[in-house]
Image: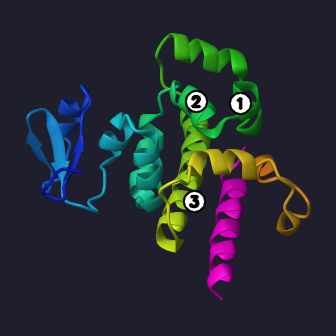
């Protein structure tokens, strides 16, 4: 954030996104400057270089914004960012999301986008990370908390509410991701009950 309480985003492709930006976004010195709490557009989300900012935005995005983002596709390189942020192996992440290894490797090499179906699964996982980040921000002190790493650990643990299954076993479908998201929301509600 700058001194005026606005968030700055530096990225060479942001200038491209500027033409699609909302009216409350100002382009200044190659930066997109937006008021605090302003939502990203689908194009801006696709170009967002900071994975955690994207994850938080996805958690708060409307269904329409998420659909547009899925239609636009996700850069295959986001897989590598997720692997690093979650501290999981690439093979494990691809297996969890039911993504074909050879296809993803090729798309990463070619700097290509994932298919809509693949993008939906990746964005769903990013949204869960954003959900956890926002939950912690609203519940406590998020300074030392790493939401992506926490999800990477938690997702591999058997959960009684899932019949002893791991949340990772639910990541390959949108329905499964929704179940896990609801479980997280219920666990937060139980903390405050």
Query: Residue 81 has which mark?
Result: none
Magenta span: 171-193
Residue 182 position, x and y percent, is: 66, 68
Q: Earlier in the sequence, mark 2 or mark 1?
A: 2
Q: Residues within 10 Å of mark 3 (few under 14, many from 20)?
A: many
User: Is disc 3 placed on a helix, strand or loop?
Assistant: helix
Nearest-to-viewer mark from 3 and 1: 3
Task: Mark 2 and mark 1 in contact? Answer it, CB < 8 Å.
Answer: yes
Residue 190 in the magenta stretch? The answer is yes
Label 2 belongs to which residue? 79
Q: CA distance from mark 2 to mark 1?
A: 8 Å
Q: Earlier in the sequence, mark 3 or mark 1?
A: 1
Q: Residue at x 71, y 63 (%)?
A: 179
Query: Residue 132 has which mark?
Result: 3
Residue 163 position, x and y percent, is: 91, 64
Query: Residue 94 has which mark?
Result: 1
């Amino acid at each position: 954030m700058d001194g005026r309480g606005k968030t700055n985003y530096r990225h060479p492709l942001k200038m491209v996104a500027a033409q699609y930006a909302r009216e409350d976004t100002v382009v200044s010195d190659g930066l997109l400057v937006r008021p605090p709490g302003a939502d990203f557009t689908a194009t801006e989300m696709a170009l967002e270089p900071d994975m955690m900012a994207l994850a938080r935005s996805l958690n708060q995005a409307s269904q329409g914004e998420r659909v547009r983002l899925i239609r636009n596709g996700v850069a295959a390189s986001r897989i590598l960012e997720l692997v690093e942020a979650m501290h999981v192996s690439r093979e494990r992440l691809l297996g969890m999301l039911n993504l074909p290894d050879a296809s993803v490797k090729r798309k990463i090499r070619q700097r290509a986008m994932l298919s809509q179906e693949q993008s939906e699964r990746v964005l769903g996982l990013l949204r869960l990370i954003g959900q956890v980040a926002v939950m912690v921000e609203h519940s406590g002190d998020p300074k030392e908390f790493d939401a992506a790493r926490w999800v990477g650990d938690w997702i591999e643990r058997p959960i009684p509410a899932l019949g002893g299954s791991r949340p990772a076993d639910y990541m390959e479908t949108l329905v499964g991701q929704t179940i896990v998201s609801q479980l997280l929301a219920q666990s937060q509600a139980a903390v405050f009950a």
